Amino acid sequence: MRKLMTYLLAAMGLTSACGQQNFEDADVNGFATLTNEANTVVLDVRHDNEYNEGHLEGAIHIDQAKEDFMEKAKAVLPADKTIAVYCRSGRRSASAANRLSAGGYKVVNLKGGIMAWTSAGMPTTTDTYEVDKFATKSGKVVKLYALTHASIRMVVDGKTEIMIDPVRKLGNKEVNYASMPKASYIFVTHEHFDHFDKDAISTLTNSNTQLVTNKRCAEMIGYGKAMANGDKLQLADELSIEAVPAYNTTEGHLQFHPKGRDNGFVINIDGLRIYVAGDTEDIPEMSAIKDIDIAFLPCNQPYTMTTDQLLKAARMVKPKVLFPYHYGQTDVSGVPAQLKNDNIDVRIRHYE
């Protein structure tokens, strides 16, 4: 009976016999402010069908009713982040918040749940793109969206839209660029169909959009700023880009990405340095790429790197955070453990 009562108390959201809770509650406005902070992870704990009908942008989904809720939570939720949790009305998320708090997490629960959120006119989405947030030196928030394969969306301070290698459709996966804001900048690494898509570029472009690419793509589309390896470009007061080499080195693969044709990019956003490697192997020039906060490194032979090459490249670049991407059917699940002692935070997102 005592065990049953303990379970019922936990399910009702009570943390102790005296009724105290060890998590915070926030109203819609406070919760909205929190979700925009770089140190916050948003968690939806409703059932699958509820999540699929509409959720907060970038929310991780773990059903609190499942027996393995805490197991899944510990596997995907970073212990050093604030967990902003919500459900339909706030009751289930309170229960989840209790368990997460007991597990050592700092948790904030949305009072009134997503019902209060939508009643206040706040946005939801049915998109399932994973979102990571980072802070620049002056505190601007940069959101990184895992769209597909090599396509990355960056949003700076909720205003500046940057698209990397936008491609509308690959296999069965399609990205609806028409539903997204027009791009401030579009960066294209090279001409291959999984990186260069004229239709996607057209959809994202208005009179203010700047296209930056290599010489070959600029010729193919008929406009854009062409950069060669080593070129640097100041795009705005707090935004600059450097084109760096990206090429194959393995015999029999050299024709895919010949040296000197394609670009990788080092993007500096208000002091936050992001390296998007493009299609490349673990080339020696990577050792000169320094002070990288976030790196996107590709992993799929014969076009880019094997997992062993990826590990070598990561140890040359030494980013604080690594996103393996462009990995197709390559198994990159073992990379985080292999780089654990290198103090690199490896995050596996759905860039297949």
Image: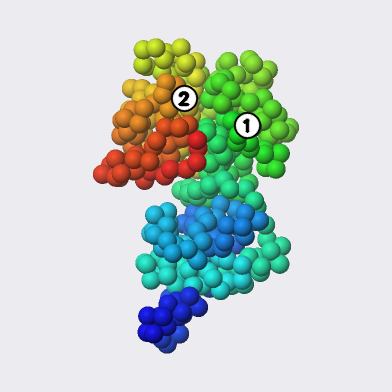
Identify the disc placed on residue 279. 2
Q: Is residue 121 left or right of residue 197?
A: right
> Could you tell me the amino acid type at mark 2?
Asp
Residues under labels 2 and 1: Cα distance?
18 Å
Up/down of 253 relative to 200, above or below: above
- Report which quarter residue 311 is drawn in: top left
Q: Which residue is mark 1?
A: 169
Up/down of 278 relative to 184, above or below: above
Q: Please name which of the two marks, 2 or 1, marks the residue nearer to the observer.
A: 1
- In percent of width and height, residue 134 lies at 48, 49
Q: Earlier in the sequence, mark 2 or mark 1?
A: 1
- Report which quarter residue 182 is drawn in: top right
Q: Residue at x 37, y 80 (%)?
A: 3
**48 and 121: which is toward the camera:** 48
Tell me if I can see residue 235 in this picture.
Answer: no
> Could you tell me the amino acid type at mark 1?
Lys
Label 2, secondary structure: give it: loop
Q: Is residue 46 left or right of residue 324?
A: right
